[in-house]
Amino acid sequence: MKATEANLLQFLKKSPQFVIPIYQRNYSWTDTQCRQLWDDIMRAGRNEKTNAHFIGSIVYVERGLSTVTAQEALLVIDGQQRLTTTTLLIAALAEHFETNGLQEILETFSARKLRNYYLVNPEEDGDRHFKLLLSETDKDSLLAILRKAPPPEHASTRITENHALFQDLIESHKNELETICQGLAKLVIVDISLDRSHDNPQLIFESMNSTGLELSQADLIRNFILMGLEP
């Protein structure tokens, strides 16, 4: 297991493809979690003193053996919710650029770059064309958004509603596009890669999602108050 700090956008840009294993639950973030991420992005984007905003870890393992000529997709063990939500936000942002004919912002944000760096692999076909493949009904709903096609008959409510939420939030903050882009560029994760020959992905997934005791409100308040003090 290797863990390193990574900028989220650079992490997405350099990765070939993420695939959500069938044993993981469906995408489940609600309006509350999406608005929290949005608020964090806007806060980071508005504050010049904030260099980075940590949003959690992404744990993955290669689906098979990669070679120089054939890089394998990455199976996501933990971090599906963050990956999917940021993908929906970036898709909504790319659409806003396209709809309004906007030029590049901050030398790195444009409709073309948002799509080709973080949403699709432009030179690949079929499923390999997309940076993120979800499982079950979530997959078709996300691909419809990325293809700018009508939603499937039995669309994932969470996918479609959260995408629409980000469209509305971007439209209502269209005078702060640079702030949105700056906030996105500051998102940081812990990049955790597993070794297929030594690590058991299923056991790690279970231990990360079913053990430990959730912090109480008192724990969170105590941590907030004491965190700024000397040890």
Image (cartoon, rainbow, N blue to C red):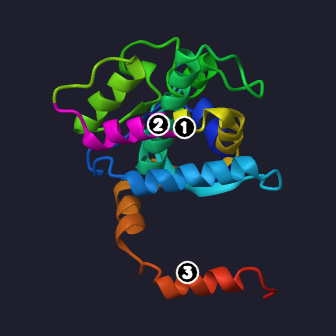
SS state under label 3: helix
Q: Amino acid at mark 2?
A: Asp
Q: Residues within 10 Å of mark 1 (few under 14, many from 20)?
A: few
Seen at 52% across and 14% down, the residue is 122
Does residue 200 show up?
no
Report x, y in % for residue 178: 71, 34
Q: Is residue 122 above or below residue 180?
A: above
In the image, the segment drawn in magenta is 154-169
Q: Residues within 10 Å of mark 3 (few under 14, many from 20)?
A: few
**Which is in the foreground here, disc 3 or disc 2?**
2
Q: Are marks 1 and 2 in contact (CB under 8 Å)?
A: yes
Q: Amino acid at mark 3?
A: Leu
Q: Is residue 40 above or below residue 224?
A: above
Please give left or right for residue 50 compared with residue 13 in the image.
right
Q: On the image, numbered disc 2 is attached to which residue?
A: 168
Residue at mark 3 to residue at mark 2: CA–CA distance: 31 Å
In the foreground, 192 or 116:
116
Report x, y in % for residue 38: 55, 49
Report x, y in % for residue 133: 37, 32
Please give left or right for residue 14 compared with residue 157 in the image.
right
Please give left or right for residue 207 compared with residue 169 in the image.
left
Sequence-wise first label, 3 or 2: 2
**Quadrant of the frame with the C terminus:** bottom right
Q: On the image, numbered disc 3 is attached to which residue?
A: 220
Sequence-wise first label, 3 or 1: 1
Q: Amino acid at mark 1?
A: Ser
Does residue 74 show up?
yes
